[in-house]
Amino acid sequence: MKTLKTVFISVVGICLCGHGGQIAWAQESEQTGGVVSKAEYLARNFQKAVKSKQDALVVKVADEIFDQQVQQKFTPGFSSYFFRNSAYAYWREDQNVKAMYSAEGLIRHGSDYHRALGYRLKFYIARNNAIDKAKANEKDIEDNKTAYQGLTGFLSIVFAKDASEDASSVVIPQRYISRFLRDLKSENDLQISDSKFKVYETLFESGYKPEGPLDTVNFWRKQYGLGLLERGQIKQAKKIAVAITNPSILRSIYIDKAYEPLWTISNLKSSKRVMRAFEDDINRLERLVKKHPDKLQGRQYLIKAYATIGKLDEAVKLADKTLEDMENFDSFTDEAKYKNWIFNEIAYVYYEKGDYERGNAYMLRAASISEDGSKGNISQVINYTAKLLNQAEYQKALDIQGKLLSEAGASDYGDMWIWYNQACGYYKLGKLEQSSVAMKKLVDKREKNYAAYAMSLLCQNKIEAAARSYLVRLEDPEHRNLALEALQISNVPKHEMPLDKILRTNLEKIRTRPDILRAVNKYGRIEAWSLSNTYWGNY
């Protein structure tokens, strides 16, 4: 039987395979004197199915090919074509097991370019499976492991020193990598922990260059540094950490004893040195904005940086200039997605200045713009609702959230903030039954967002329960760093909102408890920082 020659032959119609396909092949084989092999016949049908752009047809022909085992007779070039197109068709048809099988075939039989595609698809399929199961409160460590394997395989090919131009052109957007590494936890599984470390290692050893002037590489450096410390590679960890420029990340390292071996490097020797990093960061961001005047993300970060260290006049000046320049941005450019965050940061500046009316106006504008142009952007609706709560506008806050989020869907993390707004708002209105309903959801999902859970307890003056929550977080390596962050001391706002004062006062009661102090001393340290805590959810 001849192997397939990769030529396109016009065929009338598309075989739907199965028993009918066998008959059709037999008829054509007989008409051509046995010249057309089964592999050639099914391959030509597969090409026609792909050209039709009908995934259902592609899947039917692919099923027949696998049933008949004729893929083993394909040439290397057609094997790559077959495995690639069948993998994507299966995936789009929600047949993930078969899609993964084809992706593995692409990895085994393809060029570096096709292997990179195979690993990327393996990553996407496993990641989506893991996310879907997490949403259903199911845990499947195997999907997480497979996703890490896919990502690591992809990175090792695409960023290899001798990578071909074709292989280097295959991309997984940086935001996918960031979210994956951030969102999917190790679940105390050693193999996942090792795989996750391997991803960071590959990123840095390959010289990965993130897209855009602003990135999350500093966070990756922090996580990779921790992995190196856990493996006793202190010298390498210091080399990674010394390159960290983000001041908030430097502070998170400075307060956490898990990173104690790094405290001897220059930018972590003292809280004053960490504070200097906030000033250095402003200088860096100012240069960045000057270099990339058309990048709204850079301006968003700089406005926030000004506000964080109390330079509100500079923040307002940049905000005004940005609002003027935003008229020149096309609503369909990539920058459009940052417009709502610009409004968000401007609103925080005016809240800090005590101009609540103007702050609310900008936050409402932010809440009404989403990345896809639809109404009710989830992040800003949640932020606007929370700021209204802080102003003691409880009923208005709940009305706004209910109106703008009526048809929106949030992540588990976002849902927790929505439930916090409900639990706190209804409690302050004396509607305890409605508050209790939201509170039960917060309790059940507290591991998804401990900050929202803690704030709901502080809002209701449940000091003992809140203290227990912080102790649990401090004992858990997965949540410890953020708990230590929440317990740091920031400047008291000059124009403090009513609910903010309640939350801050109750948190201070927890911060000074002997049991909390013992846990903090065991795992980190609390410092007073000359910083403004402009974000309402740092609990």
Image (tube, rainbow, N blue to C red):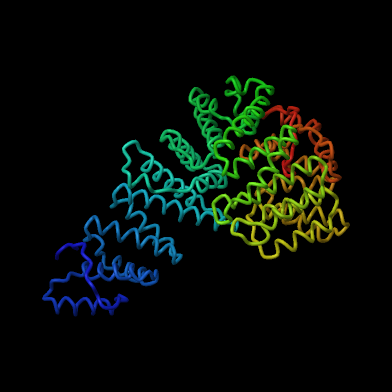
Tell me if residue 489 comes above or below residue 381 in the rendering.
above
Q: Quadrant of the C terminus?
A: top right
Judge from the rendering whether residue 522 lies leftward or rightward of residue 238; answer left or right. right
Judge from the rendering whether residue 306 lies leftward or rightward of residue 22; answer left or right. right
Of 393 and 43, the residue lying toward us: 393
Of 463 and 490, the residue lying toward us: 490
Image point 79% across, 49% down: which residue?
358
Judge from the rendering whether residue 188 lies leftward or rightward of residue 275; answer left or right. left
Tell me if residue 527 comes above or below residue 482 in the rendering.
above
Name, please, the residue furthest toward the left: 33
Q: Quadrant of residue 259?
A: top right
Tell me if residue 253 comes above or below residue 68 in the rendering.
above
Q: Which percent across, then down, holds residue 227? A: 52, 33
Q: Quadrant of residue 288?
A: top right
Q: Which percent across, then down, holds residue 226? A: 55, 32
Q: Which percent across, then down, holds residue 154? A: 40, 45
Q: Which percent across, then down, holds residue 210? A: 48, 40
